[in-house]
Amino acid sequence: MPDDDYVYDEATGEWMAASALAARDAAADRIEVRDAVGNLLADGDAVTLVKDLDVKGAGQTLKRGTLIKSIRLTGDAQEIDCRFDGIKGLVLRAEFVRKR
């Protein structure tokens, strides 16, 4: 890319293409969310519970092995947002789920 601007990166002490520096910074800002066994989770994944969980406010217990479809990442490395029948706004901790 001959038309690309170069900027000085103070962290490495080198001149870098602006697009390469922006791509590196975007990758560094991405949060990795991992399940109970270390698998990387992404939006839209299906997960199963590895432990029985009491749901506060719903008066319901989600049993181990329950399938949760189409999760969403919240921006927190330990929380995922999901939907389940009869429970609105369910947020689970990533340590209690396993990617399916």
Image: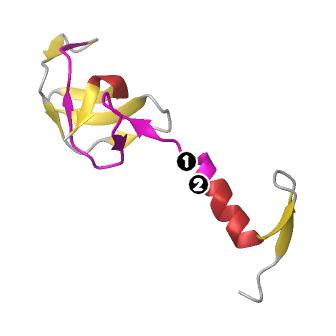
Give the magenta part as a residue range: 28-54
Q: Give percent across and percent down for residue 94.
A: 35, 28
Q: Secondary structure at mark 2?
A: helix
**Which residue is painted at 15% across and 14% down in the image?**
61
Residue 4 is left or right of residue 60, and the answer is right
Residue 21 image position (x, y, % from top left): 72, 63
Q: Disc 2 designates what residue?
A: 27
Question: Could you say which is closer to the camera, residue 8 or residue 87?
Answer: 8
Asked if residue 22 is among those painted magenta in the image, a careful observer would answer no
Q: Is residue 11 left or right of residue 56?
A: right
User: Which residue lies at the image location 62% right of the left edge and 49% below the top edge?
Assistant: 28
In this view, 11 is above or below 73? below
Q: Quadrant of the C terminus?
A: top left
| 45 on left or right of 86 | right
Residue 87 % position (x, y): 21, 26
Location of mark 1 (residue):
30
Regarding residue 21, the answer to whether it shows in the image is yes
* Residue 53 is covered by the magenta coloring: yes
Q: Which mark is residue 99?
A: none
Residue 99 placement: quadrant: top left
Q: Looking at numbered disc 1 in the image, what kind of residue is underneath it?
A: Arg
Q: Residues within 10 Å of mark 2 (few under 14, many from 20)?
A: few
Residue 11 vertical position relative to residue 100 in the rendered view, above or below: below
Color scheme of the displayed model: secondary structure
How many angstroms separate mark 2 from mark 1 (CA)?
5 Å
Circle 2: residue type: Ala
The one nearer the camera, 91 or 40, is 40
Neighbour tally class for label 1: few under 14, some 14-19, many 20 plus, Cα within 10 Å: few
- Which SS class for mark 1? loop
